[in-house]
Structure formats: structure tokens, C-alpha cells
Image (cartoon, rainbow, N blue to C red):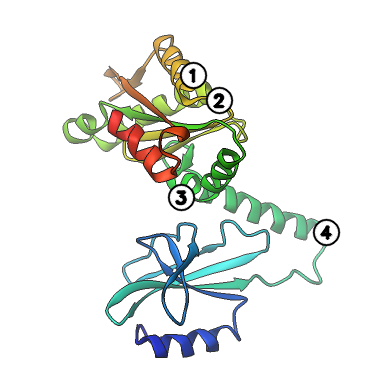
Amino acid sequence: MKLDYTKEELAVQVATLEQLFSAVRIVDAYRGVLLDPVTLEAKGSMPPIPPLDEEGRAVQLAPRSEKRELLVCQGIQVEGRPLVLALYCPLPKQYRTSTGAQNSYDRALTQYREDMRRDYVTGVYNSNYLNGEYRDYAEKQAMQGQPVGVVMLRVNEYWALRSKESQQAAECCLNTAAGILQLAVGTDREHAVLARLEEGLFAAVTVGTPAARLAQNINAALESSRRVFSITLARRGTFTVSVASAEWGETSSWEMMLALAQQRL
């Protein structure tokens, strides 16, 4: 497949691919925006695309589509500009199968979609889900006048454990912290979610309740919990969590709200 294009060549390629796929998108992954295939001007937001491999490719189920679609991504260059070509391909319909086989297929797809939203270490939501699906939901609620905020949480001992002990000890610490934080945040996604952003950093986004109140609840949960984890079979350690919050009303912007809370840590 051709990977280097001029604008004119890309427009022709998109027109050709649209005959084969249900949708063809040109994405600026760094800015998170959808581009017009002819002018390459921004024309709307785009949910995060899956990480590309060393060959600039990625494949996954379309994360926010009610349809059963496969999202195929390919990194390309357009007049020296790095972009992503995103192709949506409907999955084959399961004809001539029993009801049991169809139910099994449906459950597998549902489980896969849910797994894509989760952090592989702690089991809480990941940054793709938070900045994609949940961001859309939270922004709509904020526009309707609902309180929206974020509590940023940093496990302070994470990097020291990574450098002085082991990655396993650091991940054990994160798992223990995530369990305490998840109990404090709750499991009702309409009101709050907990996500791991990177390494030892978590974010709890709240809808309908001020972030400052959720921060108080989290601090209370941390103070009343045994923050103990296993470093080795014979050694245990304790951890602390730094907590800071920001409200939507302080910035009226998702990115700025998260950045403000992180700055306050």
C-alpha cells in the first residue's frame, strides 16, 4: 500500500477506498482531529486511535460504534505531514449459525469491547476510554449545567519502586491503590469513573458532584485503609497518594481541567 501522498493523490485514494469500506477517515492523531480529505483542514474531533505498531498499523473493533465494525489504521505521510488513514470495515454477519453460537459470538465481542476500555495492570479504565467515550459524555453533561470535575491522583512511591525494587512490586502497589480508589469512586459510570492515565497517575472524573467533594471522600478512604502491599514474599511496603482536584467551571475545557488538576499535584 502506498504510504506517501500528495493532497491530490490522497483524495483519489480516499475516493477509491470508499467503494470498499463503510467509512474512510483522515486523522491527525497528534491533535486528535478529523481532517477533510481534500483540504486537510480540521473538521471535527476524533476519538483516540489505537497505538500503531512499528510498521504504522493497528487493528481493533471500532470503540464507539454501535455497529460491528473493524477499525483498520495505517500511518501515512501527506506532503511530509504524518497522518493516519482510518478504515471502517463491517464484520461479517453470522448467517446459518445456531442461536447458541450467535450468543457466544455476541458475548465475545461485548467482552472484547469492555477489555479495550480497561487498563491491563489495574483493571480500572484506561486513558483511551476516559479521553474518548467518557469525555464526550462528561462534556455534554457540563453543557447542560451539571457539575463536572476531575480528581488527579498520584501514587508517590511508584517510580522509586520501579527503579529500586522491581516492576512487579510497583504494579502490586498500583493494584492495591486502585482497589482503594475504586471503592471510593464507585462503579456508577453515570456519576464517576476512575482511569489510569500513565504509570502511577490516576484520574477520577465526576459528573453531578463537585470534584472537591469526591477528593474529600477519596482522602477519607485512603486514611481509613491499610495502604500495604507486597514487595517480595517476605517484605511489605506502604504507599501514599497525592490528591488534587479541578472543576469544569474553572476552565470550561476538558484538556485544561485535567492539566490544572495535574499542575496542582
Query: CA–CA distance between discs 2 and 1?
Result: 7 Å
Q: Earlier in the sequence, mark 1 or mark 3?
A: 3
Residue at numbered disc 4:
99
Q: Position of residue 4 (x, y in %)?
A: 33, 84
Residue at numbered disc 3:
128
Above-or-below relation of 61 to 56: above
Q: Earlier in the sequence, mark 4 or mark 3?
A: 4
- Quarter of the rendering occupied by the C terminus: top left
Hey, what amino acid is under mark 2? Thr
Residue at numbered disc 2:
209
Q: Position of residue 202 (x, y in %)?
A: 39, 34
Q: What residue sits 57% from the left and 67% below the top?
A: 70
Q: Position of residue 242 (x, y in %)?
A: 31, 23
Residue extending furthest left? 164
Above-or-below relation of 20 to 254: below
> Helix, strand, or loop for circle 4?
helix
Q: Position of residue 91 (x, y in %)?
A: 65, 70
Hey, what amino acid is under mark 3? Asn
In the image, taking residue 263 as reference, residue 92 lies left or right, namely right
Residue at numbered disc 1:
213
Query: CA–CA distance between discs 4 and 1?
Result: 48 Å
Q: Residues within 10 Å of mark 4 (few under 14, many from 20)?
A: few
- Quarter of the rendering occupied by the N terminus: bottom left
Circle 2 or circle 3, nearest the eye: 2
Q: Earlier in the sequence, mark 4 or mark 2?
A: 4
